[in-house]
Each structure stands twice: as structure tokens, then as C-alpha cells.
Amino acid sequence: MDLPLIEGCVDCLPSAVAAYKGGADRLELCANLSIGGTTPSRTLFQQVKAVCPIPINVLIRPRFGDFLYNDWELSEMSDEIQAFRDLGANGAVIGVLTPDGTLDASAMAKLMAAAGDMEVTLHRAFDMARDPYETLERAVELGCHTILTSGQAADALAGADTLARLLQQANGRIHIMAGSGVRKDNIRTIFAHTGIRVFHTTGRRGPVDSGMVYRKEGVSMGLPSLSEYELWRTNQEEFYACAQLVHSLGQ
């Protein structure tokens, strides 16, 4: 992987196209980013792949919530990884923890076997682990390609001190990708503090009105805190600004 690199985190075709046109080097394709992301449909993957000729890594997460999975969920995840591999995905984005907050090496190894020669990113389950430095070593031992992390903080800027230590510990054995709250106004600050040149962002600028004219009051189809009539989409200009900054790092 050539550095620097910016990955667009997207959950629909319009966002994928905006990130690609805005200069994304790679996409992480998800569904339901409003709840942290879940596994996308294979149809969506095929649509994105048809119009975005850059590597696509696919989030494999069967549900909202923690990263402690039962055998049925792990079987589902393994099957999904193999299906996306067959469809031409560049990588799988996964993470499994034990009840005591350590990386579940056994479950991860099974999922990685399903991935075969795909790149594997350990996603932000890393940020929910008990010890980030021990977890990094387990990820290296497993053969993960990248760790996506905010430095176990609310966002990557707040976690900059930990990110710097993680990058130093990684020492080229695994890529450390800064994610969560990454925006055009903090990329250079995060880089200056950490040395990280791999970034993950949605490139959003704010909600887009859904276009619905009739709006039912007092009824919610999902989380009550989320409006039924706002769509969150990657903004091409916003992503372009982020990409220009990332691609200039270290030059």
C-alpha cells in the first residue's frame, strides 16, 4: 500500500461515488453508518464496484452493538467474507472480542481464513479492547494488514497521544489508520502529532433533506434520536479537501 492514503467510509452508492470522485484511494463499504456500520448487501457492493475502480474493503458486522459474537453470528460473518471475496472485494474489515475485552484470536483466525488473500483491517473493536498495545501485537501475529483506530478515544484528535505510540510500536509491521472525527480542519494536526499518514473519513458536511413532503409526526421507524427525514451522505467537495491534505502529507 502506497502512503499517504485516504479511505472513504461509505454506506450507499451516492456516497461511494462522491468519495471516489473526491480522491479516495480506497473505500470501506458498510450499511447503516448511523449505528456504526453493518455488513452491506452484495448488490450494493456490485453497484459500487461497477462505478468506482478503486479497492473496496467490506465491513463484516452482523449487527449493531458490541463485538462479542456467538457461533451463529461468526458463521454468518465467515460466509459473508467468502461471498465478498468471490465478488472481488479487496479486503474484509472485522473485529471480535472476548467477554474480558481481549482480541478473540481464535474467532479472528477463522474469519481470516475465510478472507484468504484479502487484506484484513481490524476495525474499531480495537478501540473497545482492554489493552491497545497488547491488541496490536495480537493483530500483527494474526496477519492483519491495518488497524482502524481513534486511539481508544472519542475521536482521532483526542486520541493522538495513543495513536503516536501505536504507530511507533507498529514499526512498519501493520498500518495504523486514524479514524473517527477526521475532518479537513484536523488532518494536519493529527499528522503532526502522530506521524500517521493513513486516514479514514466519511467526508460528510451535514445532513441532506430527504425530499419527503408529507411527514408523519410522532412515529419513528428507527432510533428516536435520528430524524426519518435527514440523509447523511459523503460530500464530494468536503472529501476532496480531505484527500488533498492527506496526499500532501510528508511531501
Image: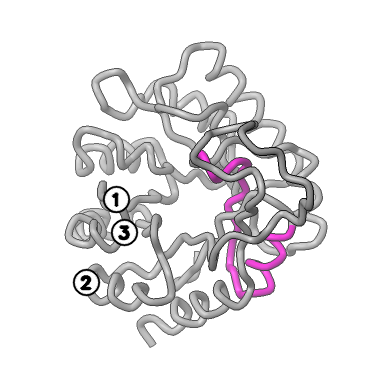
- Residue 39 horizontal side relative to residue 3, left or right: right
Which residue bears the numbered disc 2? Answer: 193
Q: Secondary structure at mark 3?
A: loop
Q: Position of residue 250 (x, y in %)?
A: 35, 82
Q: CA distance from mark 2 to mark 3?
A: 11 Å
Q: Nearer the viewer, mark 3 or mark 1?
A: 1
Vertical arrangement, residue 179 with respect to residue 219, above or below: below
Which residue bears the numbered disc 1? Answer: 154
Region in magenta: 14-35
- Residue 55 horizontal side relative to residue 145, left or right: right
- The answer to which of 229 and 216 lies nearer the viewer is 216
Q: Secondary structure at mark 1?
A: loop
Vertical arrangement, residue 84 with respect to residue 149, above or below: above
- Dot placed on the residue nearer the N-terminal end, 2 or 1: 1
Residue 21 highlighted magenta (yes or no): yes
The residue most toward the bottom is 251
Q: Residues within 10 Å of mark 2 (few under 14, many from 20)?
A: few
Q: Residues within 10 Å of mark 3 (few under 14, many from 20)?
A: many
Residue 149 highlighted magenta (yes or no): no
Q: Nearer the viewer, mark 2 or mark 1?
A: 1
**The residue under label 2 is which amino acid type?**
His
- Dot placed on the residue nearer the N-terminal end, 2 or 3: 3
Which residue bears the numbered disc 3? Answer: 156
